[in-house]
Image (cartoon, helix red, strand yellow):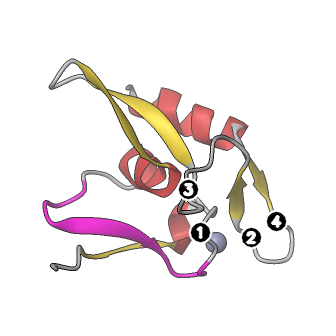
Amino acid sequence: MHRVRLQEKLQFNSQINADTHCWEWQGQVSNSGHGRITIRDFSQATNQKVSAETASYLAFIGGLPEGMMVNQTCSNRLCINPEHLCIKKIPTL
Ligand SMILES: [Zn+2]
């Protein structure tokens, strides 16, 4: 999906919390309590379900390095504010 279109979609589906400045996801939520969104991967020509915070990272910040996942510094699992996002290593089992 085009980055600007994805940014618009994410902003349309979230509400800014005036106290915490979190962008709280209003769309589909997965069992783990994270926002979920389907994005189009043009390089693979497929649709991919990703967490809303991952989509926000891809839309506002850029590519996600392999082996890394997106995490919220504010501990709000529904937050997609790019300023509240960081990346961490995917834990290995
Ligand atoms: Zn937040």
Label 4 or label 1, whichever lies nearer to me, is: 1
Image-quadrant location for residue 3? top left
CA distance separating discs 4 and 1: 14 Å
Query: Where is residue 84 shown, x and y percent of the image?
Result: 55, 73
Ligand 1 is within 8 Å of the C-beta of the residue at disc 4: yes
Question: Answer yes or no: do the residues labelled 2 and 3 have beta carbons within 8 Å?
Answer: no
Query: Where is residue 57 shown, x and y percent of the image?
Result: 41, 55
Q: Is residue 55 left or right of residue 80?
A: left
Label 3 or label 4, whichever lies nearer to me, is: 3
Q: Which residue is mark 2?
A: 21
Would you call the spot at circle 4 few (<14 residues within 10 Å), some (14-19), or many (20 or more)?
few
Q: Residue at x 23, y 73 (%)?
A: 90
Question: Answer yes or no: do the residues labelled 3 and 4 have beta carbons within 8 Å?
Answer: no
Q: Residue at x 16, y 25 (%)?
A: 43
Residue 30 vertical placement versus 17 (above, below): above
> Label 2 sits on what residue type?
His
Q: Which residue is mark 4?
A: 17
CA distance separating discs 2 and 1: 14 Å
Highlighted magenta segment, given as a residue range: 64-75
